[in-house]
């Protein structure tokens, strides 16, 4: 680690080595060479005077990038692609004259960007599936445990711990659907030339349109893609970057929502993120168990959500067939967006895998509020015993206000049931009232909804992607 100049926290603290390699210099420039080999092979197959000896020479130096030669050349010519064409030519003197034949810089630059984003989306998808698996297991395990629900962070009709987790799970499942759609729609730029007209290739193939039409599909097949975008300027549409980053922003939004809920639940002491034996929560307050992982998820997620504006603005501001004000922004925003979402998903896997639930605390808080929520049932029982519904409604309202006042002003327990039992209007004793406070009576179809969601939606997806499951996330700090 360099200590005398800036290093990105995404590399040093948050992103995995696997994602870092995808956006490394080795991955980038080795992909450039793969593209030059694919172009030369295709041009040879379409009849240009390129020899197998030249192709073999290119392949023999596909991965041993002579960075020193490329860097020295770039200082002279101020052009990264031509510097690497030169460096490749130094290693491959027989093939030197046919490297990059007919192509523009965007042939290697843009096609590489697409290949790298596709590879990065594969890793994101794998980690997202593992978050979904962890959440599915948690939701299934906790589907029957009643807990107080909240609207406006005010006590509301109970739900279950598992049903709440299914809400987080559903949002990640939506993200998976979006990711698959965008990933499956990715295409290469291909070889479109300086303004997207393929004029240089029409010249190379002596006006043979059929050969020009075959060029892009053949290159795409060699690189493992279903095809190329049918039309472009010099670059692929920057709308592609926008779509990819919107997928990452969607995942970040889902992670942020879940992490916020966990932070609030940890404040209530109902659910807690994992806390290691020697972990320090605060430098001053030794007793604290701060939800630092969930806080980090929220922090990185905000970065990714905002980062999605970069490709959107870049896409909107491109001039005609090509302008270079996209390049510097793309180098930073796309790579760091992926590195950040990688770190977020590792944290999500780690947190969900180690969530601790405290049923006694959950029950205590639920029971403290349940008398208010049981009033509808109590009123119906009193009507069956001969009471007047309208009069009972008004009386329950008055007693609820009194019980609430005592809780807030006196710090007393919720005494609503005792107040109702003492009121002759209801004709209900405390035993009957206590029976009405069984929490499971108030969670509706929660457990059933979780089971149906898991069986109908989530488990088929997990079954289909079984080979990608089983990851365990290691977090650096």
Image (cartoon, helix red, strand yellow):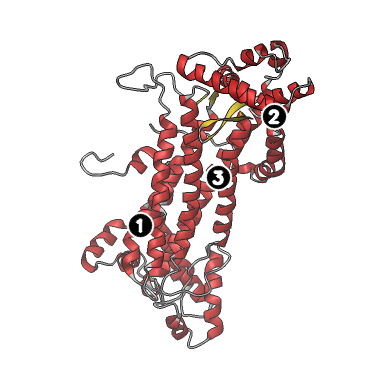
Q: Which mark is residue 390?
A: 2
Separation (CA) of disc 2 from disc 1: 68 Å
Res 29 seen here = no
Q: Earlier in the sequence, mark 2 or mark 1?
A: 1
Q: Which residue is mark 3?
A: 126
Q: Which quarter of the figure is the C terminus placed in?
A: top left
Give me the residue at 45% from left, 60% from top. Answer: 241
User: x, y percentage for residue 323?
Assistant: 34, 71
Q: Nearer the viewer, residue 166 or 114?
A: 166
Dot 3: element: helix
Give me the residue at 62% from left, 36% from top. Answer: 136
Residue 82 sits above or below residue 26 on the image: below
Q: Image check: 319 left or right of 451?
A: left
Separation (CA) of disc 2 from disc 3: 58 Å
Q: Image check: 455 left or right of 188?
A: right
Q: Earlier in the sequence, mark 3 or mark 1?
A: 3
Q: Which mark is in front, 2 or 3?
A: 2
User: x, y percentage for residue 245?
Assistant: 45, 55
Give me the residue at 51% from left, 37% from top. Answer: 258
User: x, y percentage for residue 17?
Assistant: 42, 42
Q: Which residue is mark 1?
A: 331
């Amino acid at each position: 680690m360099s200590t005398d100049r800036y290093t990105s926290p995404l590399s040093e603290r948050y992103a995995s080595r696997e994602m870092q390699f995808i956006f490394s210099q080795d991955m980038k420039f080795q992909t450039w060479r793969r593209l030059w080999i694919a172009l030369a092979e295709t041009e040879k197959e379409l009849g240009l005077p390129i020899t197998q000896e030249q192709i073999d020479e290119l392949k023999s130096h596909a991965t041993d990038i002579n960075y020193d030669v490329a860097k020295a050349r770039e200082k002279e010519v101020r052009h990264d692609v031509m510097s690497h064409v030169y460096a490749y030519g130094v290693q491959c003197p027989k093939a030197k004259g046919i490297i990059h034949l007919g192509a523009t810089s965007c042939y290697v630059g843009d096609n590489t960007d697409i290949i790298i984003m596709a590879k990065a989306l594969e890793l994101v998808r794998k980690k997202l599936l593992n978050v979904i698996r962890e959440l599915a297991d948690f939701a299934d395990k906790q589907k029957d445990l009643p807990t107080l629900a909240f609207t406006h962070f005010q006590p509301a009709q109970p739900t279950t711990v598992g049903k709440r987790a299914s809400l987080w799970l559903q949002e990640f499942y939506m993200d998976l659907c979006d990711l698959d759609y965008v990933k499956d729609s990715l295409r290469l730029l291909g070889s479109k030339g300086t303004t997207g007209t393929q004029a240089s290739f029409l010249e190379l193939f002596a006006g043979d349109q059929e050969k020009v039409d075959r060029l892009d599909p053949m290159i795409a097949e060699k690189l493992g893609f279903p095809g190329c975008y049918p039309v472009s300027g010099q670059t692929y549409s920057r709308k592609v970057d926008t779509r990819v980053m919107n997928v990452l922003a969607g995942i970040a939004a889902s992670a942020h929502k879940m992490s916020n809920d966990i932070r609030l639940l940890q404040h209530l002491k109902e659910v807690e993120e994992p806390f290691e034996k020697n972990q320090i929560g605060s430098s001053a307050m030794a007793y604290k168990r701060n939800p630092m992982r969930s806080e980090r998820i929220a922090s990185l997620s905000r970065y990714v959500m905002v980062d999605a504006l970069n490709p959107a603005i870049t896409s909107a501001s491109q001039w005609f067939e090509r302008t270079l004000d996209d390049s510097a922004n793309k180098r930073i925003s796309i790579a760091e967006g992926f590195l950040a979402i990688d770190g977020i998903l590792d944290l999500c896997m780690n947190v969900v895998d180690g969530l601790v639930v405290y049923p006694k605390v959950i029950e205590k808080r639920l029971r403290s509020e349940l008398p208010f929520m049981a009033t509808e049932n109590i009123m119906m029982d009193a009507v069956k015993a001969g009471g007047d519904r309208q009069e009972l409604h008004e009386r329950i309202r008055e007693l609820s206000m009194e019980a609430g006042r005592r809780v807030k002003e006196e710090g007393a327990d919720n005494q609503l049931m005792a107040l109702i039992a003492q009121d002759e209007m209801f004709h209900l004793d405390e035993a009957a009232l206590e029976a009405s406070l069984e929490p499971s009576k108030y969670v509706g179809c929660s457990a059933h909804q979780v089971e149906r969601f898991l069986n109908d939606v989530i488990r088929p997806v997990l079954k289909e992607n079984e080979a990608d499951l089983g990851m365990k996330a290691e977090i650096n700090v």
